[in-house]
Image (cartoon, coloured by chain):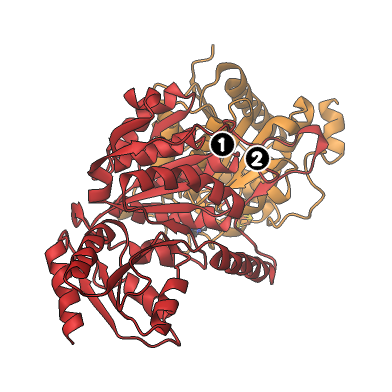
Amino acid sequence: MAVKTQEKVLVTGNVAAAEGAVRAGCRFYFGYPITPQNDVPEYMSARMPEVGGTFVQAESELAAISLVHGAAAAGARAMTSSSGPGLSLKQEGISYLAGSELPALILNVQRGGPGLGDVRCAQGDYFQATRGGGHGDYRLIVLAPHTVQETCDLAHEAFDLAETWRCPVLILSDQQLGQMMEPVRLPTMKDVPRVQDHPWALTGAAGGRERRIVKSFYWRPGELEGFNQRLRAKYETMENELPRWEEDAADDAEIILVAYGTSARITRDATRAARDAGIKAGLVRPITLWPFPAEPLVAAAKRGARFLVVEMSWGQMIEDVKLALYGHPAPLDLYWRAGGGVPTVHEVAEQIQRIARE
Amino acid sequence: MTQAAMKLGRPKALLDNRTHYCPGCGHGVVHRILAEIIDEWDIRDSCIGMAPVGCAVLAYQYLDIDMCEAAHGRTPEVAAGVKRARPDKLVFSYQGDGDLAAIGTNEIVHVANRGEPISVIFINNAVYGMTGGQMAPTTVPGQKTTTSPKGRSITGEGYPLRVCELLATLEQPAYIERCVIGTPNKIRRTKNAIKKSFRVQRDLKAFSLVEVLSPCPTYWRVPPTKAAEYIETYMEEIFPPGIIKDTTK
Ligand SMILES: Cc1ncc(C[n+]2csc(CCOP(=O)(O)OP(=O)(O)O)c2C)c(N)n1
Ligand code: SF4
């Protein structure tokens, strides 16, 4: 495959995520077909054998995430990908992965919902991704790329994050980002063994060592509460250390736009157009959706900025903006399209002008 | 160690924890069989087990080997994930009949059909033990459970699912046998079947499954001493013990 030898290639966001994961040492991919992410399993079915890896087309997303569960428990860097209805099925396994503190990579190439919805671009899975779509108190590290290059780079980094924090990573992409092609400079191939002997991994209790149990079940009174407290403390540390974002002309901006993924690309163009028209607009683009980057928003609010959130959902990310601005009241607007509607640069620019006139 | 000596003491691989199983429960007997095999073959360092969601959810409290939990019914897929990652290990999936034959029917069929080289220990006690004795896909016609208070009727509730026979129609499984936790002879036969299943995995790298008709005196509402008779009277006709498929010969 061409991708293997060239360092700069023209690929879709989906293939970029797949190759980024491969170069991060991912040797186990388990998937199930669903549009708009089919080129991930298709690519992996050919790529995995080339790198001595394992590809399985499972019978369902429940099975695919369960295969990830097993491989991750055994110390592998394992990945799955899906969209919409498939992500709903994976929630069971994701909750178990989080409860067992296993590292894994899950890619969601968002499509429209609810239900079967359609296969066009949408961002309606924000709550599912950031609030925990499965049962129980848990978090995932949620990464939101906005270019094909960034999709590749974040997939390349994801397993390091997942293993450092013993927490699954979810990359929240979308249909446009997943299916568009852009040139990508491929990262280096990390030197990671096919399976790693983490101190918690199932390897067989050799040399008389103590047995290891990978589980999320705590049944003695108080035991689960203790585990939840430990998890919460871990998440608090992550909230301090992990938030990441990118700013575009936000320094002196009087109107701060907040958007991620494909919405961020459109919004960036709209803010630049507004600047050209003499309006001081800027963009804050969260790269981690969990933990959500409050810092740049609070800083802007303290400067007296007002905010416009742009998203392809009815207003999901705006709740995190509100939480970030808690205690720092600032005017806040939302522009959204959902169900396959993608905001145009012109529409967003008009919204900026409207706010500027108020 | 001879079999006689094994019978006297607790196998090393069976931890000295008091089990949470009811008196006369088959799970404990099958755990002991597994522990005996682990000792006899000296495979503690190369054996990895999957605990199900069901009464055996705490199997890892009793077996002194590396073990993993799985979501209800996904047990064989989690086992397949472990086996794919560590093909040199002996991996078994331990499941009840709700886990394997209801919520996990899809998973067991496809793991078997892909010929994943794991050993499946399938405990058929004809009820959902852990949740309080509800009807299982394997509940026998007329059997009263907490969700079939008048007895399972075939109309509407279906006939008991024969998992071994179902899986035997697939090409890939190498060995499928149905055994019983009953008389000492039947228990010995169960142990031999599990051993054979491990051999099939190790030597032939093939899928195998051992179904065990196993007592749940609590929810059959019979005294433990009558459990063996209950299996013979009510279960063995519907689930005939014996080798259902064997391509190893
Ligand atoms: C998704 C899900 N649904 C339901 C349950 C509740 N549940 C726990 S064990 C069980 C049935 C167990 O029965 P079986 O597999 O026959 O094992 P046994 O307890 O009889 O050994 C059920 C329904 C669950 N834990 N998860
Ligand atoms: S309820 Fe039945 S299966 Fe569960 S421990 Fe008791 S006897 Fe065993």
Location of residue A41 by image quarter: top left
Residue ID at (65%, 46%): B26
The x, y position of residue A314, in whole percent, is 24, 71
Question: Is A222 situated above or below A86?
Answer: below
Circle 2 is placed at which residue position? A202
The x, y position of residue B111, in whole percent, is 44, 33
Label 2 close to label 1 by CB (< 8 Å): yes
Colour used to depict chain A in the structure image: red
Question: Is B40 situated above or below B74?
Answer: above
Q: Which mark is residue B82?
A: 1
The x, y position of residue A53, in whole percent, is 48, 28
Indicate left or right for B176 with A315 as reference.
right
Residue farthest along the top direction in this orientation: B249
Indicate left or right for B220 with A133 as reference.
right
Whether callout 2 and callout 1 share a subunit is answered: no
Question: Is A185 situated above or below B203?
Answer: below
The answer to whether mark 1 is within 8 Å of ligand 1 is no
Callout 1 secondary element: helix
Quadrant for ligand 2 reads bottom right
Q: Quadrant of the N terminus of chain A?
A: top left
Location of residue A192 by image quarter: top right
